[in-house]
């Protein structure tokens, strides 16, 4: 009869990815409970599936580059003067992903657009989707650094191949015509196939100010807006409110 270590080595050779400690614990449990062969296979499969799901989530989370963000249960829905909470909660069901629809979070700086986008992306990750979160400026700079057409095509797949792409902060930095063409390429390739989220402080008619002189802006807006859920946020800056709260708590001299 083979030793437990020999059995685990055999499982590893067959491609089982579960940690050795977890496999030892499972083997001890199955031996003690005198599990049937069918129960042994069932629990081994369950352990391996959990391990693969965890590794898959870790890999997709690393690729998503979400960074740190405030959990949705800490979002103060009473702070904005106007926000469509029902629409956002509907978006969390991810039906828009199934139809390749887009989402626009629009409002002035500091009202929570980025945070809502990150939380939406996190839900998509947990539901098994591939995600990438980036500022628009970082994405365009990344693409602009590619020195050949083949290199650019390979790097574009980073942004066109994921189920959900979140482009943060459109409108905060001006971009040249080539950057407009790159964004148009991303939006066009994802159009009606995969969902894109954009956060901005600008109305659609003002997008041209970000890409002065670019001929593709009208077509870019047209394609992005065709199937788009718009969440407008009318609020004062959270950061300004927090600064005012801190100032009010300081002892008076």
Image (cartoon, rainbow, N blue to C red):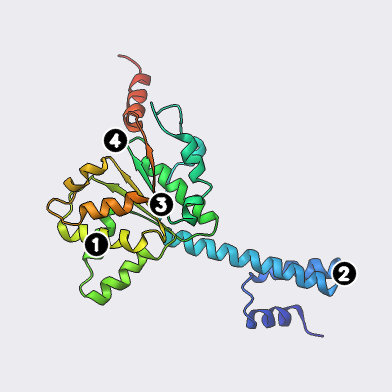
Labels 3 and 2: the sequence-earlier one: 2
* Residue carrying label 4: 108
In the figure, 6 relative to 157: above or below? below
Q: Residues within 10 Å of mark 4 (few under 14, many from 20)?
A: some
Q: CA distance from mark 4 to mark 3?
A: 22 Å
- Residue 184: which quarter of the image? bottom left
Is the C-beta separation of discs 4 and 2 under 8 Å? no
- Residue 114: which quarter of the image? top left
- The outermost residue toward the bottom is 1
Tell me the quadrant of the picture where the C terminus can be found: top left
At 35% across and 68% down in the image, what residue appears?
A: 157
Labels 1 and 4: the sequence-earlier one: 4
Is the C-beta separation of discs 1 and 2 under 8 Å? no
In the figure, 248 relative to 22: above or below? above
Q: CA distance from mark 4 to mark 2?
A: 64 Å
Q: Residues within 10 Å of mark 1 (few under 14, many from 20)?
A: some
Is the C-beta separation of discs 1 and 3 under 8 Å? no
* Residue carrying label 1: 182
Q: CA distance from mark 3 to mark 2?
A: 46 Å
- Residue 165: which quarter of the image? bottom left
- The outermost residue toward the right is 34
Labels 4 and 3: the sequence-earlier one: 3
* Residue carrying label 3: 67
Labels 1 and 2: the sequence-earlier one: 2
* Residue carrying label 2: 34
Instruction: Give SS at disc 1.
Output: helix
The percent coordinates of residue 75 (x first, y second) are 46, 35
Is label 1 or label 4 in front?
Answer: 1
């Amino acid at each position: 009869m083979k030793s437990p270590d020999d059995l685990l080595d055999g499982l590893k050779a067959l491609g089982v990815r579960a940690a050795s400690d977890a496999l030892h614990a499972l083997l001890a449990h199955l031996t003690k409970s005198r599990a049937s062969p069918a129960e042994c296979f069932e629990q081994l499969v369950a352990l391996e599936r959990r391990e693969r799901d965890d590794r898959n989530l870790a890999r997709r989370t690393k690729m998503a580059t979400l960074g740190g963000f405030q959990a949705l249960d800490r979002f103060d829905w009473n702070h904005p003067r106007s926000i469509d909470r029902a629409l956002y909660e509907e978006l969390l069901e991810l039906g828009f992903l199934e139809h390749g629809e887009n989402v626009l979070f629009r409002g002035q700086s500091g009202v929570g657009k980025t945070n809502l986008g990150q939380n939406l992306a996190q839900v998509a990750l947990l539901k098994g989707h591939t995600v990438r979160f980036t500022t628009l400026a970082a994405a365009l700079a990344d693409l602009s650094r590619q020195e050949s057409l083949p290199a650019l095509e390979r790097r574009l797949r980073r942004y066109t191949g994921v189920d959900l792409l979140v482009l943060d902060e459109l409108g905060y930095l001006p971009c040249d015509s080539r950057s407009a063409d790159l964004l148009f390429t991303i939006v066009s390739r994802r159009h009606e196939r995969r969902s894109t989220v954009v956060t901005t402080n600008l109305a659609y008619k003002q997008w041209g100010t970000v890409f002065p002189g670019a001929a593709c802006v009208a077509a870019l807006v047209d394609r992005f807006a065709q199937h788009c859920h718009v969440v407008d946020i009318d609020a004062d800056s959270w950061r300004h409110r927090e600064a005012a709260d801190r100032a009010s708590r300081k002892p008076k001299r």
